[in-house]
Amino acid sequence: MSLFGELKRRNVFRVGIAYVVTSWIIIQVADTLNSMLGLPEWAPKLVLLILLIGFLPALVFAWAFELTPEGIQRESEIDRTQSVSRETGKRLNRAILILLALAVAYLLFDKFWESPWQNPGASSHDPEPVMAGDGAQQAAAPASDSDELISRQSIAVLPFENRSMLAEDVFFVQGIHDDLLTNLARIGGIKVISRTTVSQFADTEKTLPQIARELNVAHVMEGSVQRAGDTVRINVQLIRADADDHVWAQAFDRQLTAENLFRIQTEISEHIAETLESTLSAEERQRIDERPTDNLAAYNAYLRGRQALSLNSSEGADRALVEFRRATELDPEFALAWVGLAFSAGQGFSFSDMDMEETLQITREGVNRALELDDQLGEAHLAHADLIRREQGSWMPEYEQALTRAIELSPGLADAWIRYAAHLAPHPDRADEALFAAERASELDPLSNSVQTQMVWILGRLGRFEEAEARLQQLIQMNERFALNYSTLSQMKFAQGQLADSLYWLREAQKRDPGNIVFQLAEVWTLTSLRLEDEYEDLIARVERLDPASTTLAMVESVLYLSQGKLEAALAAAKAWVERTGEGHGRTRASALGWQSTVHSYRGEYADAMALLSEAGFSAASPESLLGMARDVPGRACTFAWVIHSELDTSLAEDISREAIGHTLTRRPHEQRRRGMDLIQCHMVLGDIDGALSRMEQAIEDGQLGSWWLPISHPMFDILRMEPRFLDIKQRIDRDITAQRDEFIGLTREKSRE
């Protein structure tokens, strides 16, 4: 008998087939158990190695031995007439069929019915992973597979490598990477980690499975870009992270044109969607297939602007504005460049010396032009939301509509989710929505300082101060240079009446971004609350140096003078604030007019105060606007109620006061405490002296010392100044402020010695 015939007779082929199929099933089970139990990444590889080593011995065993009714015997010792190899072969055939059926069943199960530990109840447009425990408590830190179960439709695109080795090409490579992420963020069925987070894995020594576990993604993409003359090569490879297997790889060699670059990004996005089994809708396919510009020079300027904007600093904002303006001049039809222009103006106001009038002008120009060119850009609607907030206020229905439209068009846009969360957080009945939106942003951008800082602010609004502060301290340890972390911690301390700590952390923020004028403005309230009058002139000098003609300078001067009782100087500065704001600036001008009205009321000039309120849009003729203010900003409403009461002696002032007090009682307990001082004036309007004093006592007991001087230095309190309870309250405030002022001086001295 030939060797082939003998191998067949001894069932060597059948044993080999059975071994291979069984091994495949074992490997799949091992892979599943590895995902479920969080076994070491080498565990599946060890199983594979053992199976490979065992294959040859199994074949040798099948050749040399036979399974008989009496047990295993050497094949050479068995009489051919007594051999049962034929029956054994039939049993092996049945076993192979059963194993093949199991393998096919597993393949069908894996394709059409996802395991409950991988993605329960998800569809191609519902890739939400299931959160383990309280997601809000875990979103700040980089999550791991013990924190959150991983969606199969999730990916982290790591920063691309610059293969040209030219420093000037860095922005180009980063831009290609950013644009691919922007494209993927438009696909609702995919969770794609945002740029801010993945950029922290550039040049990392961590393995891909380690990175995937930290970011809770199932897939990782690596890539490189090489630009040479008028050609570009882009290499990408998609890896299944748990097995570290290459799923797909491709090199794109094209002529360097804007059209080719966008075509490559579209092809990559489509292939990722297909591999991750996410069905693209017609609208999504159209959005990722669009070419933003055909002008390569405009595209390069846009990429430089994006890079500058990502610095989140005053210098970056100024540079971004120049680059985006250049991009729009090179290609006036470049919608994304107009969006960038709008964002850089907003950042310029927040971080640099740009005044509100210029900010609104540039933002309005950018938003209107972008939406006119392409109203399907999620980023354009996000910029529109920013414009509405600055012009009219975040309480306007149009603001929420713009945010939800941005999320609808770009579901992976972390910035839109976190701003939506911040919008919802002040509303007691929408706390769950706010946390969901914040967690979604944190999931998309877990290592982003700005997203996590906003998450902290939201937790603070919800009264979860200890958790919020713990997150902030963790963020500061992760990135000691990011100024916003320090200013946010300062705000949190201020809200809790810890004024010395608040000023200390604010000064730390100023050290890291000295050009941020908003940080200087925030210092007004801590300095006046601590009565550090010897530092007033230095603050004015710093603000004047940053922007001598800004509205910020006038506001700072007015607040400082009012805290000192210098009413004439406070009024002159308030008038300068209104004049510098100019006409037609909506909410900003209304704020300036409202402050000037407040200063007039401190001077007892209630007719002038009432006239300014009317000019700002709040008058006795429109009681709904004032009642709305009582619900949104009760502190300001109480001040206005006193003005109306003093000038007109109408029941409207009492209605406003009752509305402010009543609506505050519907808020969360910590918000009721935080607004304690704000409501004192409303009790005075209602003639409730005992209520006013009780409110003050409770506010001091709760440590609500931020801006304590503003309400109780108002002339309306003249009738209380000799009341024993009022004198006792004032003494308690003086003691606490003196102790905190000494604490701050001690902190400063200790820091200077280090």
Image (cartoon, grey):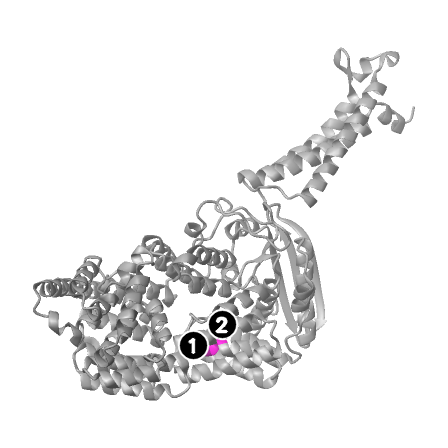
Magenta segment boundaries in residue numbering: 343-347
Where residue 555 sits in the image (x, y, percent)?
A: 29, 80
The residue lying toward the viewer, choosing from 514 and 361, is 361
Instruction: Indicate the quadrant containing the N terminus: top left, top right, bottom left or bottom right.
Output: top right
* Residue 521, quarter of picture: bottom left
Q: Main secondary structure of the magenta part?
A: helix
Q: Are marks 2 and 1 in contact (CB under 8 Å)?
A: yes
Can I make out residue 42 in this image?
Answer: no
| Left or right: where 519 falls relative to 76 | left
* Residue 86, quarter of picture: top right
Where residue 144 sits in the image (x, y, percent)?
A: 49, 48
Disc 2 marks which residue?
A: 398
Q: Residue placed at 25% from the left, 66% from the top? A: 679
Q: Is residue 190 above or below residue 710?
A: above
The residue lying toward the viewer, choosing from 150 and 127, is 127
* Residue 661, quarter of picture: bottom left
Label 1 secondary element: loop
Q: What label sits on residue 392 in the rendered view?
A: 1
Residue type marked 2: Glu
Can I make out residue 64 in this image?
Answer: yes
Q: Is residue 246 above or below residue 4?
A: below
The residue lying toward the viewer, choosing from 249 and 464, is 464
Instruction: Work out how far the residue at label 2 is from the one at label 1, CA to CA, in angstroms.
Output: 10 Å
The extreme right residue here reads 1
Magenta segment includes 201 = no
Q: Is residue 508 above or below residue 359?
A: above
Q: Residue placed at 45% from the left, 72% from the top? A: 396
Q: Earlier in the sequence, mark 2 or mark 1?
A: 1
Instruction: Indicate the quadrant containing the C terminus: top left, top right, bottom left or bottom right.
Output: bottom left
